[in-house]
Image (cartoon, grey):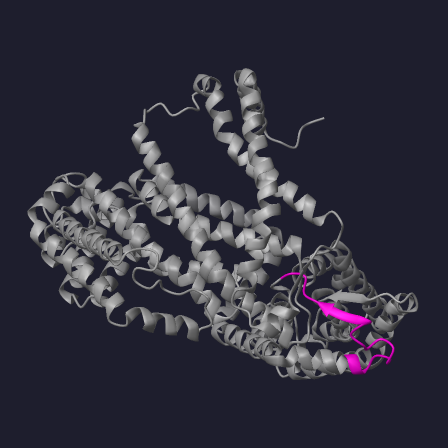
Amino acid sequence: MSSALDDDTQAALSAGRETAGAMLRAAQKDLQKVFIVFLIGFLGSFYALRLYVWDFFKGITYAQMNDAVAGEVEIIAQTPFDVILLQAKIGMVVGIIMALPPFIYYARDALKARGAWPRSPVAPWKLVLIGVSMVVLFIVGVAYGYFVFFPFTFAFLAQNADAAGFAPTYSIVKWAQFIFLLTLSFGLASQLPLAMTGLSYAEIVPYELFRDKWRHAAVGIFAFGALFTPPDPFTQIMWAVPVLTLYGISLYLTKIVVTAKRGSEKMDIAATAKYHWNLLAGVGVVAGLLVYAFYEYGGVALANVGLDYIGSDYFFLEPGSQISLGAFVVAGGIVGLVLGLGYLVYRDIERLERTKIGVGDPTKLDLGALDADGIRAAPPEAFTDVDEDRAMALASAAIDEGNNDKAQAILDRFDEAEAEREAAAESEDQPDELEDRTTRAGTAFFSELTDGETDEDDIGGYYTDIAFIVESLTSRAFWVVGWFMAVLAVTFGWLYTGGIKIVYDDFLRSLPAAVRPEEVLNVVALHPMEALIFEVKFSTIVAALATLPLVAYFAWPALRERNVVRQRRRTVFLWTGALTAGLLGGFVLGYNYVAPGVITFLVEDAIAAEMIIAYRITNFFWLIFFTTAGIGLLADVPVLMVLLNSAGITYDMMRNRWREVTVLILALSAIFTPASITTMFMVTIPLMAAYGAGLGILFVVTLGGRRNLAPARGAAE
């Protein structure tokens, strides 16, 4: 039997197995030491969680909550094994992380034999410096998360759930996962200085890319924050602003390192400090005096008033309460001294970048750091790898700085380089007469072979149609995206500001009296962001449904041109009315009768057994959605199929494409329903049943596909 893996993949897997085996054999006599390290990490973290960490996490969770909200928040274990298994999992992860370095060290002989050990020796003090820097940066990032971000975020999430009428009853597993995930994100984000500096120094990612693409980096940081933080502006800013600041600091450090490597002169920080000792001393003294004035002339009291106003339990220490005022003044002076030295080094970097243009590799010349005269004097090799996007970005940056002369110089030099490249290409790529005749003969032969016609179905006409239709929508993308985002924002804003509570209270009133009391039926949030995630998903579904008619209206001319539909564009309004009527009719039926009946049926046995029922927000509201709007969507499936048939899509095409429809429905169910295979199939099976019912209706209406509802092509015109 042939393997599904190619030869290269099999060879890589085989080499990996051999390396792992060799590492185990090399470290065999020291595995006991590795296991002891693992055991220390496992048991230490296990008991640390039990004795200290859980209480610390609870402290940061309740830190910024008012008494009313804090009284509603509970952290529970859903099963008897939740806590101990969670502690064991975390302990194993910590133990493995701690055991990896000694294991790799003891297996170094096997790695050296296979060329996987670094051959260039690195000074031990450099390794220690890198390791200490990583640890310090990680601690700083985690400290910001624990003492600033988490207290405000948990207060916001709990208040939002409580205001909507849900009990913020967090599962200890989901609560801990939320904390550890964001802790890791803050710790990794704090490694930006080392990552950017290392990548640029090794020339893996050029410094200029980090500098020129800072706008993309800012968008990426905000997008990452939108995924892993609550969707309110305050918490996203609390996430993004420190990371953006860190990106700026990292960019500065990267510039220092790269300039020191590329520059023709060596930066001598000690000489800079010695030459400007008087300026640095003055800056340090002024900084110390500012700290002294802050502590002695009301700054501490004012800062504490501000912290108390925002509800923080933290405050500045009064001078002399634990640390002497002199220590604060000295620390301020040192900080001022370091900042002053950093500015002087930065100034030296600017000077180094603007001198001796012809020295070193001209293709690595930082054009953005040159002035207009430097651009004009730069060697031609400096523009060899500059494309149009790069040139326009440099010119735009110069215009933003108010240096129009530099922008014009950049464009002029780019035009010159582009003209030289085109001339070289023309001289190397002159068409050969014999080759031209051969090409024409081959084209004629192929034309004769295909009777002078090209069947799009033979070369992927199905995808050509899709590409043509999508391309026709690009000019209308602003309206489509704008309408989608407007509906999404309005729906989410309404749910977020109390709409979800209105729906919840109104639906409870439709239930029998025996099911309503809180001691019988409760809706709880097991995950801190559960309510917000449901609101975002539901708003996305509503926005998508509201955008479909607009997309159909804009795409209709392209659909007619590709003979997908035959009716005029005003048919979209008829479609929208018919589908909306079906959706609303099914929704009313489900909301008033089906959903209350289903929920009552599901809970009546538990009520008879005097049990307390606690639904998760996600499960409860998706159940309501499936039994209300879901009824309308099921009714719309046959209606839509009849409308599509009247527009020109034949019965045979719908019947033959049922597999593609099934895959599409499965994909949409996986995206917009809770993370459960059961729920995904509970959505897919009724929709496919409705699709089958629609095929049955079309079979009858179209006489088995022999007489479709679409008008003749001439009548449609």
Question: In the drawing, does residue 25 fall left or right of residue 199?
Answer: right
Q: Position of residue 634 (x, y in %)?
A: 78, 71
Between 44 and 709, the one nearer to me in the picture = 44
Q: Position of residue 620 (x, y in %)?
A: 75, 68
User: What is the chief secondary structure element of the magenta stretch?
Assistant: loop
Up-down relation of residue 159 to residue 98 (above or below): below
Identify the residue shown where x is 57% and y is 47%: 449
Q: Is residue 516 magenta?
A: yes
Q: Position of residue 22 (x, y in %)?
A: 54, 18
Q: Quadrant of the N terminus?
A: top right
Identify the residue shown where x is 38% and y is 73%: 306
Question: In the drawing, does residue 302 fall left or right of residue 635?
Answer: left
Up-down relation of residue 516 to residue 222 (above or below): below
Q: Residue 517's image quarter?
A: bottom right
Between 23 and 552, the one nearer to me in the picture = 23
- Which segment is the magenta one? 508-527
Q: Residue 669's image quarter?
A: bottom right
Q: Quadrant of the C terminus?
A: bottom right
Tell me if residue 484 can be seen. Answer: yes
Identify the residue shown where x is 67% and y is 65%: 525
